[in-house]
Image (cartoon, rainbow, N blue to C red):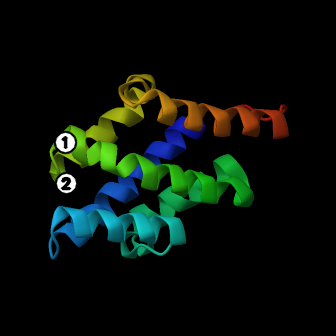
Amino acid sequence: MLKLNLFATLLVVSMSFQNVCADDDISSALQKTQDCLRNQNCDSMKTNTGMEADQKALEAVGGNAKQELYNIAADVLPILIQQTEGDPKKMEAMMLKAQTDPESFLNSLPPDMQAKIKNVANGLKNQAPSQTP
């Protein structure tokens, strides 16, 4: 469940990046998007899709871990930019595909990022063993 909601959050990331990238170079857009994710104040989070993704994240991880989810999304963003050569449309397509095959997406990330995601997921399992994903 965490992985799926990470991808919902990352979809918001790709939307945020696309909105910021229209006016800025990639480096500046990356920094602005990472900042808005860490602060949870991206303009795209105010859209229906963004609010839905935020609600899914909250339901999946609760209030305390939601910030960690957004931090991970911010950390994954440079990897997505590299893998998609900075193309927001390719990034969005990658995130949509990741929703149907989250394991492949997870495996495409560097080992340290995979470990970070797995640690958050395992922490959530330990907090609420009776909940099923």
| In the depicted structure, whether residue 52 falls above or below residue 36 | above
Residue 102 position by quadrant: top left
**Mark linked to residue 131:** none
**Horizontal and vertical percent position of residue 64:** 73, 58
Residue 126 position by quadrant: top right
Residue 118 position by quadrant: top right
What SS does tag 2 mark? Answer: helix
Q: The residue under label 2 is which amino acid type?
A: Pro
Q: Mark 2 near mark 1, Cβ–Cβ under 8 Å?
A: yes
Q: Residue at x 74, y 39 (%)?
A: 124
For discs 2 and 1, the disc positioned in front in the rendered view: 1
| In the depicted structure, whether residue 18 falls above or below residue 24 | above
Quadrant that contains the C terminus: top right
Q: Which residue is mark 1?
A: 84
What SS does tag 1 mark? Answer: helix
Q: Residue at x 17, y 73 (%)?
A: 24
Q: Which residue is mark 2?
A: 88
Quadrant that contains the N terminus: top right
Q: The residue under label 1 is which amino acid type?
A: Thr
**Horizontal and vertical percent position of residue 81:** 24, 48
> Disc 2 versus disc 1: distance between alpha carbons?
8 Å
**Horizontal and vertical percent position of residue 104:** 38, 23
Q: Residue at x 23, y 63 (%)?
A: 27
| In the depicted structure, whether residue 96 falls above or below residue 36 | above
